[in-house]
Amino acid sequence: MSRPMPPVDVRLMNATASLAFFGVFTLVCVALVFWLLRNPAFAITQVTVHGNPQHSSAASLQANVLSQLRGNLFTLELAQARKAFEQMPWVREAELRRGFPNTLEVFLQEHEPVALWDGPEESSMLNRYGEVFEANRGEVEHLNLPNLAGPREQSGHVLEMYHYLSGQMQRHAALQQSMQPVALYLTPRGSWQMFLANGAHIELGTGQQLQVGARLEDFWATLPQVLAPLGLKEQALEYADLRHRNGYAIRLRGVATRVGDEAALAPGGAVRAPVKAVAAKPTAAKPATAKPAARAATPANAKQQPAGQPARAVRAGNVKDQKADGRAAARP
């Protein structure tokens, strides 16, 4: 047997009571939220930084970030606050978390500089991900970072090539520390240029890692054969051009090259003209051998080459060491 429906006036009273209760409950919730938002007890009074930052000091955070934080623990826009942290010079990424009742937890990841980047900004550097960032280079002077350069969008590619070539050269026991690469540039035309610690300049040409690496490996493997007749070591290298198909051109410190009937010799054996010597790569059938020159150039018969006119390249096998006066020349 079903229960009878309550009278209409009773149902109206129940509905009115329910609405009144809901309204009061809503007002209480709104008041509570308003109280929480305005209560100074929840104002951010402490910022805890995690991640062991090396370059982001408390003073830097205070000056650049904390003054930009607006709101308390509940009203703070975390996205905007994170952007403020990531705009600091050394910060790569920032993650923020609220800590009850008035603490902001900040997890910072700083850039780890691995190279200086020669770009429009003198403060540019590369991190270990190959990303360009701006910061004070004075803080990393003690690291003796290499100099890299190239199109900004290929910064990661330049860093990979430097690591590849640097590791390749470190495996050569004969190469001293002064012969290690300190700079690598990628030209707009895609050609690689390397500079060593002793100031030597090497033109590597174009290509990918394996191509450029093989070219450089052949050069270091055959260079001692070129220098042996002169009694020189790799440290005498001043310039090398590896862009030739079947050889390479080199210029040595204190060694001049004889061009035709003219020799470009300066007092003391210094080279005045841009002189080069081409070293042919040896083959298995016929290894390269040094041929003695007919006669060595002397100051009496030496004639200065016109400035700005490059000397004709000669074969390194025709190089003769003049130990009598400390100078060397080569005949074509």
Image: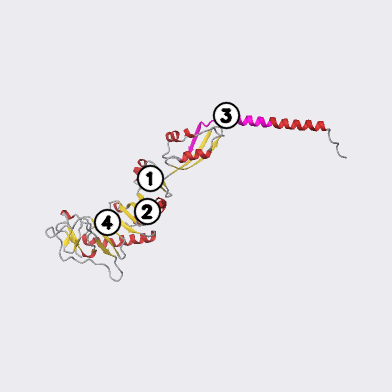
Pointer 3 residue:
38
Q: Position of residue 194 (x, y in %)?
A: 32, 54
How far separated are the C-alphas under marks 1 and 2?
17 Å
Q: Is residue 304 above or below residue 33?
A: below
Q: Which mark is residue 307?
A: none
Q: Amino acid at mark 4?
A: Tyr
Could you say which quadrant of the image residue 102 lies in? top right
Could you say which quadrant of the image residue 231 lies in? bottom left
How far separated are the C-alphas under marks 2 and 4?
19 Å
Q: Secondary structure at mark 1?
A: strand
Q: What is the chief secondary structure element of the magenta stretch? A: helix
Pointer 2 residue:
162
For discs 3 and 4, the disc positioned in front in the rendered view: 3
The disc, 3 or 1, on the residue closer to the chain's N-terminal end is 3
Q: Amino acid at mark 2?
A: Tyr
Q: Which mark is residue 239?
A: 4
